Image (cartoon, rainbow, N blue to C red):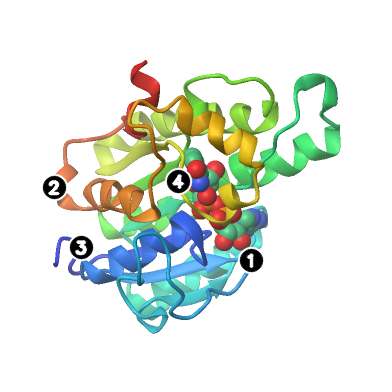
């Protein structure tokens, strides 16, 4: 249980859902973890397969709006000052959006791009100097199956998740020689507050299109993130890790 021993990790959107699952599993695997979010984590609440891997107290919390570049600099500064550096950033914060092109207002487009796309850019930009000081690092960017496959509607969401994959590959080759790796994770349907807020019709359609015939839990994504964050994946950069019950293999 020490695959991340000695590592310092920052997880955006780490208060609930997939980000909370990642933060808790990283802590259980020996990392020092800061979860950063616009909401506070619920202490000790059950998530996914059952209890959190760690008490909420094992994960430090910092307020962060990923669209705010000054907030990123502040949080990265706090993490470096407090823990001596930063090895891992998981750009997980994200918002859903469901409108098709003809329904989508420009303000909604801007909102979704701000969090899901600009937030990932600002996060990588904020931590890369700190990772250089550390001599390397791992950037894990949460995309989606909808960054690779289209479904009707959800234009802004799908646009951002495709962009996350492109930005990840760009960062991977730009910083490869400095041992800063960047990889994307493409989850399928995961049980979180985000999917709980979607219509039953939407959720049922995604699960019906999933060869395994079911969704999954935040922990299923967190295990993949542990691999990408750890030294086990030292030669892995610029890739997509698809965790989707077979959705994209169809
Ligand atoms: N749940 C799924 O089925 C699924 C599938 C594929 C990809 N994803 C992606 O996984 C990530 C996490 O999704 P989730 O299902 O856990 O969603 P969620 O809504 O349950 O959690 C998202 C978290 O991000 C935080 N957040 C939102 N805006 C923020 C901002 N501006 N600054 C900081 N934090 C902010 C929220 O407060 C929340 O804690 C997202 O990027 C999402 O697109 C989810």
Q: Nearer the viewer, mark 1 or mark 4?
A: 4
Q: Which is nearer the N-term, disc 2 or disc 3?
A: 3
**Residue at 50% over, 20% down:** 149
> Mark 1 highlights which residue?
38
Mark 1 residue CB less than 8 A from any atom of ligand 1: yes
At mark 2, the secondary structure is helix
Q: Which is nearer the N-term, disc 3 or disc 4?
A: 3
Separation of marks 2 and 1 at Cα, in angstroms: 32 Å
Q: Which is nearer the N-term, disc 1 or disc 4?
A: 1
At mark 4, the secondary structure is loop
Separation of marks 2 and 3 at Cα, in angstroms: 10 Å
Does 151 sit left or right of 182 as displayed? Answer: right
Does residue 66 appear in the picture of this structure? no
**Residue at 34% over, 76% down:** 83
Q: Where's residue 136, x and y in %?
A: 27, 51
> Mark 4 highlights which residue?
190
**Image quadrant occupied by the N terminus:** bottom left
Relative height, residue 216 to residue 81 (above, below): above
Tag 2 and tag 1, C-beta contact below 8 Å: no
What numbered label is drawn on residue 4?
3
Separation of marks 4 and 2 at Cα, in angstroms: 25 Å
């Amino acid at each position: 249980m020490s695959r991340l021993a000695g590592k310092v990790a920052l997880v955006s959107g780490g208060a609930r859902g997939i980000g909370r699952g990642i933060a808790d599993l990283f802590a259980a695997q020996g990392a020092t973890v800061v979860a950063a979010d616009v909401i506070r984590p619920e202490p000790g609440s059950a998530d996914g397969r059952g209890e959190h891997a760690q008490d909420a107290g094992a994960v430090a919390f910092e307020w962060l709006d990923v669209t705010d570049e000054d907030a990123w600099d502040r949080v990265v500064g706090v993490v470096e000052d407090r823990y001596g550096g930063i090895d891992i950033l998981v750009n997980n914060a994200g918002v859903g959006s469901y409108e098709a092109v003809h329904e989508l207002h420009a303000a909604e487009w801007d909102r979704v791009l701000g969090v899901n796309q600009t937030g990932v850019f600002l996060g990588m930009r904020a931590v890369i100097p700190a990772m250089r000081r550390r001599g390397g690092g791992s950037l894990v960017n949460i995309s989606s199956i909808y960054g690779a496959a289209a479904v009707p509607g959800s234009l802004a969401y799908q646009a951002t998740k495709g962009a996350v994959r492109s930005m990840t590959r760009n960062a991977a080759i730009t910083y490869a020689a400095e041992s800063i790796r960047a990889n994307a994770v493409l989850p399928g349907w995961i049980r979180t507050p985000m999917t709980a807020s979607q219509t039953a019709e939407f959720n049922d359609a995604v699960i019906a299109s999933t060869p395994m015939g079911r969704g999954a839990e935040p922990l299923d994504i967190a295990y993949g993130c542990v691999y990408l964050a750890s030294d086990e994946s030292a030669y892995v950069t610029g890739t997509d890790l698809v965790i989707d019950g077979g959705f994209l293999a169809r």
